Amino acid sequence: MRRYATISVLREVKEILEKHKGDQDWSSFLLKLLTEARELKARVSFEELRRALSDEDLESILRSSREFRERFKLR
């Protein structure tokens, strides 16, 4: 049996969300919003990091990663 909960939000917020929700159920809609927000945040963070690192930094990270994988062995 599925259990449901009530989430209190301002009426105006609910009206805005309902317009975007369309025919989706609330659970699917909210999970989709969360997934999209997380993906966007990850992409933005990745791009910021990429811009902050030089080509030399990226090469050094790649080299270190390769060395770690070559030396790492399960016991």
Image (tube, rainbow, N blue to C red):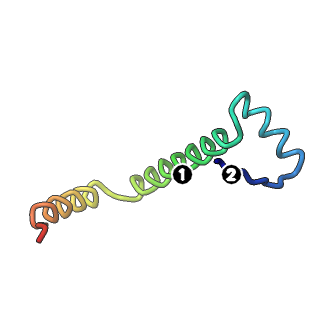
Q: Tell me the residue at 43%/52% (across/down).
A: 46
Q: Kindly give the residue lying farthest to the right in the view shown.
A: 11
Q: Tell me the residue at 20%/61% (across/down).
A: 65
Q: Kindly give the residue lying farthest to the top in the view shown.
A: 23
> Are the residues tagged 2 and 1 within 8 Å (C-beta)?
no
Mark 1 is surrounded, within 10 Å at the Cα level, by few (under 14), some (14 to 19) or many (20 or more) other residues, namely few
**Which residue type does callout 1 highlight?**
Lys
Q: Position of residue 55 (x, y in %)?
A: 28, 54
Using residue 32 as the reference point, say whether residue 5 is left or right of it. right
Numbered tag placed on residue 74 in the rendering: none
**Which residue type does callout 2 highlight?**
Arg
Q: Kindly give the residue lying farthest to the front in the view shown.
A: 1
Q: Which residue is mark 2?
A: 3
Quadrant location of residue 30? top right
74 versus 53 height, above or below: below
Is label 2 in a helix, a strand or a loop?
loop
Is label 1 in a helix, a strand or a loop?
helix
Using residue 37 as the reference point, say whether residue 3 is left or right of it. right
Q: Which residue is mark 1?
A: 41
Instruction: Looking at the picture, tell me which residue is in the foreground, 45 or 73.
Output: 73
- Earlier in the chain: of badge 2 and badge 1, it is 2
Instruction: Looking at the picture, tell me which residue is in the foreground, 71 or 30.
Output: 30
Q: Position of residue 34 (x, y in %)?
A: 60, 48
Q: Which quadrant, please, contains the C terminus?
A: bottom left
Q: Position of residue 35 (x, y in %)?
A: 55, 46
Q: Tell me the residue at 63%/43% (across/down).
A: 33
Mark 2 is surrounded, within 10 Å at the Cα level, by few (under 14), some (14 to 19) or many (20 or more) other residues, namely few
Instruction: Looking at the picture, tell me which residue is in the foreground, 37 or 49.
Output: 37
Quadrant location of residue 57? bottom left
Q: Tell me the residue at 64%/48% (across/down).
A: 1
Front position among marks 2 and 1: 2
Using residue 11 as the reference point, say whether residue 36 is left or right of it. left
